Each structure stands twice: as C-alpha cells, then as structure tokens.
Amino acid sequence: MNPSPRFMVNAGLLIALAAAPLIAEWLGDSFYTGLLSRVLILAIAALSLNLLIGYGGMVSFGHAAYIGVGAYMVGIGAFHAFEDGIDWMLNGYIQVLAAIFGSALIALVIGLISLRTRGVYFIMITMAFSQMLYFTAVGVEIYGADDGLTIYERSDMLGLIDMSDEKSLYYLIFVSLLIVLYGLHRLIGSQFGAVIRGTKSNEARMRSIGFSPYKYRLAAFVIAGSIAGYAGFLMANLNDFVSPDMMHWTRSGDLIIMIVLGGISSLFGPVYGAVAFLFLEELLSSIPLTIGGLRVGEYWQLIFGPLLIVIVLYARNGIDSFLPREERRA
Amino acid sequence: MNWLLFLEQVLNGFQLGILLFLLAAGLTLVFGIMDLINLAHGSLYMMGAYFCATFTAWTDSFLLGALLALLATFILGLLVEVIALRNLYARDHLDQVLATFGLILFFNEFVRLVWGPIGLDIPLPALLNTTVEIFPGVPYPTYRIAIILIGLLVAGLLYLIVSRTKLGMLIRAGASNRETIGALGINIRLLFTLVFGLGAVLAGLAGLMAGPILSVEIGMGDGILILALVVIVIGGIGSIKGAFIAAIIVGLIDTVGRSFLPELLELFFSEANAATAAPAISSMLIYILMALVLAIRPQGLFPPRGASG
Amino acid sequence: MTNDLLVVENMVKRYGGLLATDDLSFSLHEGELHAIIGPNGAGKTTLVKQLTGEISSDSGSVILADKNIERYSEPARSHLGIARSFQITSLFPDFTVLENVLLAVQAHSGHSFRFWKRATEVADLVEPACAILQRIGLEARKNTPVAALSHGEQRQLEIAMALASNPKLLLLDEPMAGMSVEDSGKLMTILQDLKSKVTILLIEHDMDVVFTLADRITVLVYGRAIATGTPTEIRNNADVRDAYLGEEA
C-alpha cells in the first residue's frame, strides 16, 4: 500500500506533535508543552464539531457548551472532594464518565429540539441554547457563578497517569487525539457515516430512497457533544479552572474558525486549524512593532478579524488548499 | 404580592422589549431581504452607544449626541456593507457567520483601542432624569418612559414605511421572494445597502438608548444579540410585526420572570432552595419559550406571508 | 379482473390560485407499464410528488395495495415499495457511482447505526448494488465520482437508484430526458425487461417510447385526466388529439 502524499504530511504532523514535549524539554522551555496541550484539546473539540459541520452540514454554533459541561464535571467533583471530603468525586474515571454522559445527555436534549430546524434557524438555535447553558452556569452561586471555580486537585487517575505532570498530561491528550482521529475516520467511512454525508449532500434524495435522517443526525450530534465533553475534562485538568466563559457562544465561534482555517473537507483539517489558530494568536500578539505608543501585538484581533473575512472570501478551503489533496474523500 | 412592584416590572419588561425590537427589526429585515445572517449587528449596537457617549461629551447635549451617533452609525453601516458584506450575499450561511464573527472581533478590539478597556458612562440628560407618576403614588423613571415612547414611535414609522411606501413594498416583496425583485429591474445593490443602513441605525438607536441605563462596554452587543436572535426565531424571520410582538413577549417574560420567579418557586420549595435555583431558571425562561414555539410552529409566530424557504 | 396496485381518488393540489392537480382519479393495474403524457405544466411531476409523499395533497386519497397511504411519510412509502427517479437529476454528487447505489440498497437493509465497518466493504450491500449496476450497464464506472459522469450516465444512475430498493411501484419521471439515442435504446430494453415484474408509472414526452412500451396511457392536461386507455384507444381519441397529440404530430 503506497502512502499518499497527504498521508505523509499528516503523519509528519503527528510525529512532530509526539516529539514536541521531548524537544521542549531538551530546549529547556516547557512553555510550548502547555501551549500544545491546549492546541490538541481544542483540536479534539474541533474534530468533533467537524463531524457535524464538514461531514454533516449541521452548523452548530453552540458546541463550546459541551466542553464546558465536561469541564464542570471535573470542577464540581474537585470542589466537593475538597470542600466536603467526598473523595470518590475526585476519581478521574468517574469524572470522565460524568463528562461524557453529561454532555451526551445535554446534547440529546438540545439536539432533539434543534435538529427539527434547518439552515439559519439551526445556527441561531444552537447559539441560543449554548447561551442558555452559559447563563445557567452563571446563575449557580455555589460553583462560583461568574467568577468560575478553581480546581485545587486534578483528576485522580488512580496512579495510572499523573495529571499534574505536564508531560504525562500531554501524552494523555495526544493519545486521546489519535483515538478520536481514528474513531472518526472509521465512523465517516461506515454505513452511519454514509447516511450523515448523504444527508448533507442531498437530503431530498435520502428521504426518497427511504432514509429518515433525523435520528441519525441526532446520533451524530450526541456523539460530537460527548467527544467535546471529554475535551472539557482534559481542559479542566490543564487549566485548573472552569468558568462559564468556556461555554460562551463566542468560544464556539473560535472552534468554527479553527475548522475553516484548517479545511472543513478533510479529516485532519481541524488539527491543522487548531495549530494554526493558536500559533497565529501567539504570532500576532508578539509582533515587535509599536505605532504611536501602542504595541501592535496587544490589539492582534484588529488584524485577525479582517484576516478571517479575507480567508472566508478568498481562501475558503483554508490550509487544505495548500496541502496535497486527501486521497479519497467522499 | 406587591402589585406596584409588578407594575413596575411590567413596564421594565416593555422597555426591554422595545430595545429588543429595535435590535431585532434590523436583524430580521437584513435576513429577510438579503438572506444575510449578520452576527456583527450587536457590534453596531455597541458602536451606537460609544458614538453617543463621545458626542454627548463633546457637545454637552444628549440630544445632539444621540442624533450625531445615529448619523455616524448609519454611515458606519453603509461602510461595512460596501466594504465587507457585499460579497457575502451569495455565500452560504456558514461563510456569513464566520465573516461577521470576524467583524465582531475587529470591532471589539477597535473599541478597546480607541476608547480603552474600561467602559464609558452616558449621563442621563437632566430633562429625563426624573420620575413620572404613572399612577398616583407610583413613580417611574421618565427616561424609561421615553424609551418606550420613542420605541413605539419608531415601530409606527417602520410600519408606515413598510406598508405605505415604495421602499416598503420592495422590502415586503423581497422578504417573500428575493428573485422577483431582481427581475423587476430595481437597483438591488442600492436597496440592499439602504436596508442595511436602516438596520444599522435601528441597532445604534437601541444601543444609545440602552447606554445610560446599562453600561457602555466592550462586547455589550454580543450578549443582547442572542436575545435578538431568539426574538426573531419566535417572531418569524423576515417579519417586523413578528419581531415586535415577540420582542415584547420576550422582554416581559425575562423581566417579570426574573423578579417573580423566586416568589413563585417559594410556593413549592424552601426559601433557600428557591433563592439558589431562581437565577439559573429565570435565565432559561425565554429559551424554553423559544423551544416551545419551535416545537409547535417552527416557522415562527408571524412568518411573512408566502415566505420562500 | 386485474388487481389494482395503486388507486388515486379525487386528488387535489392547489398552489395559491393555481390548481395543479384537479380532482384526479386513476388506477394502476399490477404489473402494467402505465404512461402519463401531457403538455408541459400539466402537473405530471406534481402528481409523482404526491404519490411519493414529497408534497401533501389538499384532498383525495392514495391507496397502495388496498392500504391508504396518505399519512405515510416519504421514507415510509419507500419502505412500502414505492421508488422514484427524478426528472431533474438528483444524485449524491460527492459520492462515486457505487456509493450512490450502495446508499439506496443500505436504506432497505435494516438500520444504519453501524459505526465501524467501511460501507464499501459490506458484502451484503455491495453485491446487490453491483448487480444493479451491471443490469443498468454502469458496472465499469462504479468507482467514478458522479460529477465525472456524462449526462446520459447520470440518467442511467437515476434509474439504478430507483431500482435498488426492489420496488413494487416504480415512478419514472422523464427518464430519457437528454439521453442519446443509444442510451435511450438501452434503457428501453431494461424497461421492457422490467415490465410485468414491476408496476411502472412512466412520464415521458417521447411518443415512440410511450407507444412502444405502454400497456395503458393516461393523458393529463391542466391537472386533469382527459383520457385513459390502451395506446390504440388514445391514438384514436379526438379529445386527446385536439389537446395534445395534434401539437406533437
């Protein structure tokens, strides 16, 4: 089997990411390990969202809410373990299950309602529901409300993984990314994936040949939400902090930017997009230019905003357009 | 139950509803005619408030400041349409959402650059900084009454424009069937630009009126945008009448709901529990309403007649 | 006494002031090839859409094998045995020929909550799909993306998609539209072959095809059936000649 050029580039990226913490350690600068941890977590969330947007044609603008739900499971667990001595709530495995099932359940409820709508309505409604979750989190005083919740102790993985160790956490995240990538790859090629892609391609024909797309789309919505919930679990451990801001609809916008930056039509697109997004942010905010007493880097979104518009108008396929074409993507 | 408090909250609800209507009207017009989902509408709301704050400070007159701010927002709207949005009409909604999201990032940062990270104050004009007795012994801020009156005036004007003028006819035709107005040989570009400008002015008006009572700060449009979206989903995309009715309903439910929910909950739960649950649940009320409307009547309460897709 | 597979009674469909289907009644005998002809705008495609459930009638009933299917959704009717090809080609443009037919076969092979195995490697789906492609004559092109097919090949694929569900009632909406003479000939042979195995409702403008293949013909004008009968009867019908055939010459 001859690996395609695209496959080589993707493999190269993964190898680079695998080696990154070791290189960082060798260079004596562990800043990048933390940054890349964040990149990869967002990549996982973006990958799950792209199942909906790129493959399913469902533009969900409320995906960040599920990351928040997953993260809050960790936060709440840590809180009660710390405040009330309920130790089992610090158990990482229980927190993971809570994160995944919690976000799945909420995705189910929101999906049940939202997926009855199309196009712009769907976009607006998913936005609205995620905002609802945001305000719900803001309203719960005991878990910090607006100010958020500090996590004093990371998930207890019962000795298997030390979440407080930067490198261990990074590799957990990295392996998770690999699993999600492979899982999505299989999902997309499967019969289920064919229904999801077919519905995006020509919904009228799908109904004509005998498919009722609603239940499959709902399943995809729940799957994507659960993966995002898991990303939230990782995020909470990385940041030692959760807050309602994680669920704000503008965070969902960031995820969509990553997907489009990387290329919505390819499996790896969101990974490139997440890397590009965060490095772009780092790059732009450290521009060593000062105009009229103001540091340009501090106002990087002034450049990023219009840049986004330019990309949407003229480089719609994002990074995908600059890489060798993916072998066979239907 | 405190009836005076209830009355006050109903009026507050109306006032919030009016603000939401101004914001939603522009949004629904632009969406209905140009099929453009403009997330940066909230940014125009914000700019209206910031312009007003600055012009009021310069001219020492709220009225003058407001009028100048409306003009400035109109011009800004025209600029945004011509420079950035024109190319988006033909694109799919994902592209529109992304590009206008980019505009939001730009405007928030622009405001931070020009006006700094700390919010601004718009002092209430002395004339309106009083109370009016709507019922004997019931004082209510004059300014809020003014908002309601101005809002109703604008709603009336909009109604007249939409139902009596040629522009309005084009708007209604466009909302029902976009292709036809093109075929009629109307200068579509000009129409679109004007409609967008109109929407911008409405958003700016809402922003500057809200300024003195809410705070003028970065990102102030992002939150209220969602409420406006909920309003037009409930009212029916493309329908101004729907936007008005839905806005009032949403404004009332949100305001009255928030004030009286703790009391209502106390009928069923302990005071402590009610107090804890109330803030979270009251935030959910309008979204629950939206979900109900979608379940029963997905095209909204008053969709424009014969609306295409 | 032949069995009526499909009975349409007093079907009405209005679009604002326009009466697209005007109190239409007719029936299809099981196993027959029944052609619907009529001038443009007669409401032929609207009729098909009401039969498949894509649009709902304002009044009237549709009875399939003695069962009133008015309340059945489009996917449900597909599972009752109705299949349709589209007048304006409606395929899955990002998929290959095989993947298109595979979807149609998959729709009738139980649920699709299968998340792991590659769809193109499921023998139970691929074998029937390839069989249909062979029958239609597209087997050689099975791995070609639809966008790369010629117009005629796309029309062939349209038929293949409809056949993939092993239908009892096949609704063909101008299948030969835009096809070359050679391709039309091939399709004629396939339809000849299908006759009496499947009940077919054929909408066509090509009179040679209609008069060769049809067991019976119904003439639709302004949403109303003005005549139904054998090809000979129709050819000799004065009303039909005035309304339609006269123009066709």
Image: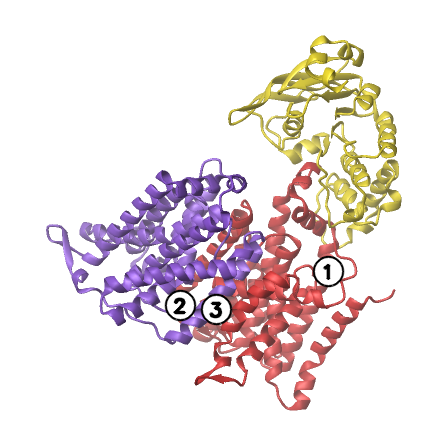
Chain colours: A red, B purple, C yellow
What secondary structure is found at the residue carrying circle 1?
helix
Mark closer to the chain start, 2 or 1: 2
**Disc 3 chain ID:** B
Asked if the residue under mark 3 is in contact with the one under mark 2, i.e. CB atoms within 8 Å, the reply is no
Screen quadrant of the C terminus of chain C: top right
- Tell me residue A313's x, y (percent): 59, 61
User: Which label is found at residue C39?
Assistant: none
Q: Foreground residue, B62 or C161?
A: B62
Would you name the residue on which mark 3 appears? Answer: B106
Labels 3 and 1 positioned on one and the same chain: no
Labels 2 and 3 positioned on one and the same chain: no
Q: Foreground residue, A228 or B226?
A: B226
- Tell me residue A241's x, y (percent): 49, 74
Say what amino acid the circle numbered 1 marks: His
Against A297, is B134 above or below? above
Marks 2, 3: nearer the viewer: 3
Can residue B146 be seen by looking at this rendering? yes
